[in-house]
Amino acid sequence: MTKQFVCGTGNGPVNGQTTFTAEFLENCFVNFIIVNNVNESQSATSPEFSHSYIMGCITRTNPWVTGDNLIVDYTNCKCKNCN
């Protein structure tokens, strides 16, 4: 599944921050993200982002810039411990 956000609008990332928090991130596994048509991975030797399902956030090495387009590719958690 995917969700799309734009930095600086509504529920999107905030300019200048390196984290993005959303409720759906608490109950899923993030496969990868795409920022401005560039695929970012958390499994590379030097990961571009990390995902914390406990905090419900994505943390990037680069700060968000107004207008950045974020696409989150994720899989819903189906374990009995998820809300």
Image (cartoon, rainbow, N blue to C red):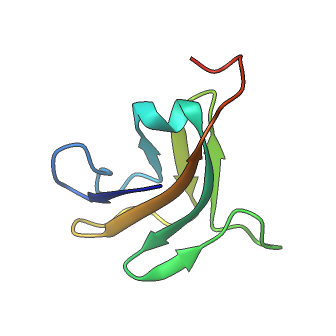
Left or right: residue 43 versus residue 23 is right
Q: Is residue 43 above or below residue 15?
A: below
Where residue 81 appears, x then y in whole percent? 70, 17
Left or right: residue 23 versus residue 25 is left
Seen as rendered, the residue at the extreme bottom is 37
Can residue 81 be seen by looking at this rendering? yes
Q: Quadrant of the C terminus?
A: top right
Relative to the observer, which residue lies in front, 52 or 25? 25
Seen as rendered, the residue at the extreme left is 9
Where residue 64 appears, x then y in whole percent? 37, 62
Where residue 35 appears, x then y in whole percent? 42, 72
Relative to the observer, which residue lies in front, 83 or 17? 83
Where residue 52 appears, x then y in whole percent? 64, 38
Looking at the image, which residue is at 78% across and 72% down?
A: 44
Relative to the observer, which residue lies in front, 42 or 72? 72
Q: Is residue 33 above or below residue 30?
A: below
Looking at the image, which residue is at 54% across and 30% down?
A: 26
Looking at the image, which residue is at 16% across and 52% down?
A: 9
Relative to the observer, which residue lies in front, 59 or 77? 77
Count the marks: 0
Q: Quadrant of residue 28?
A: top right
Q: Is residue 22 above or below residue 2?
A: above
Can residue 56 be seen by looking at this rendering? no
Looking at the image, which residue is at 31% across and 67% down?
A: 65
Q: Is residue 82 above or below residue 13?
A: above
